Image: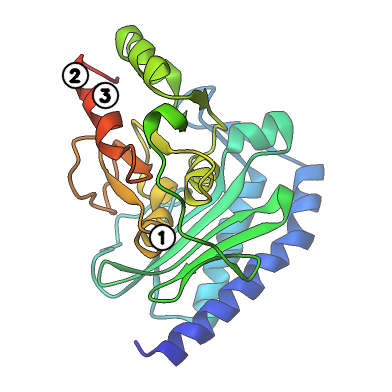
Amino acid sequence: MDDKSLQVIDERVQTWLRTLDEMIPNLVKDMQLSTKQNRYDLVTNVDRTIQNDFESFLHEHCPQHQLLAEEKSNEDINPKRGHTWVMDPIDGTMNLVKQQEDYCIILAYFIDGQPMLSYIYDYPRQQLYHAKRGSGAYVNGKKLPTPPHIPLQEGILSFGAQFVNAETLNDLFEAAFSYRSIGACGLDSIRVIKGQFAAHFNTNPKPWDIAAQFLFAEELGLRMTTLDGEEIDFTKAGPFIISNSGCHQEVLDILNSKGGYI
């Protein structure tokens, strides 16, 4: 795909994302909640409506493109062939339900498995992060700088503490400057992308939780691997880390030295 065609798609998607500014308040006002696998696995009318609306957008503007997304069956999708969008319509659904804050929309565009466009829309803060292959990463149109080199002893770590065994947890707390967890993989990752956190890892993400982070990491010189330090298959996801290069290996060494994570 040439740069002009990619630019057209980028502009259309950014325009679509901004239409959510009118949609989301009404959906939240009349929120309908249900559970999936357990009482912590939540889905709302906000998730479903946003995803359905984007699917309609694709049918209109990019009918040959396919969508791999959280709130649908993906049995007919071959994500590594052709034009594929990966979407989490609401990342941080529990935060949406309990706080009406700290949630985002994650969206990424791949061609034959290569990330081309990425978006993380922090709707409550009205901050749209996006990346375009070969052109860098931006927030609300302003280019993001490459994050500084941060050693672990000077950095904030982000992860779900309940998924790390007690001994490893203690080692991580002692090695890092501090610890935080927002509870939305996209927003925790954004703190790494902005250089506020040194690293974020997640022990059980799905493809839509981490789809956008691949391109941000490439464009900003961050490390994004499995927790074994290997390349991630974006169609399967699994345990992953996005981090500053200054602490990547140290975090992995601690995680894998004593049984680590669940």
Rendering coords of residue 246 (x, y %): 34, 42
Foreground mark, 3 or 1?
A: 1
- What residue is shown at x 38% (from left), y 80% (from top)? 64
Q: Which residue is mark 1?
A: 220
Q: Secondary structure at mark 2?
A: helix
Rendering coords of residue 160 (x, y %): 45, 24
Tell me the CA gap for discs 3 and 1: 24 Å
Labelled pair 2, 3 in contact (Cβ < 8 Å): yes
What is the crowding at mark 3: few (fewer than 14 residues within 10 Å), some, or many (at least 20)? many
Identity of the amino acid at label 3? Leu
| Mark nearer the N terminus (1 vs 2) | 1
- What residue is shown at x 53% (from left), y 65% (from top)? 130
| Mark nearer the N terminus (3 vs 1) | 1
Which quadrant holds the N terminus?
A: bottom left
When the figure is inspected, residue 144 is found, relative to residue 183, above or below; the finding is below
Q: Which residue is mark 2?
A: 257
Tell me the CA gap for discs 2 and 3: 6 Å
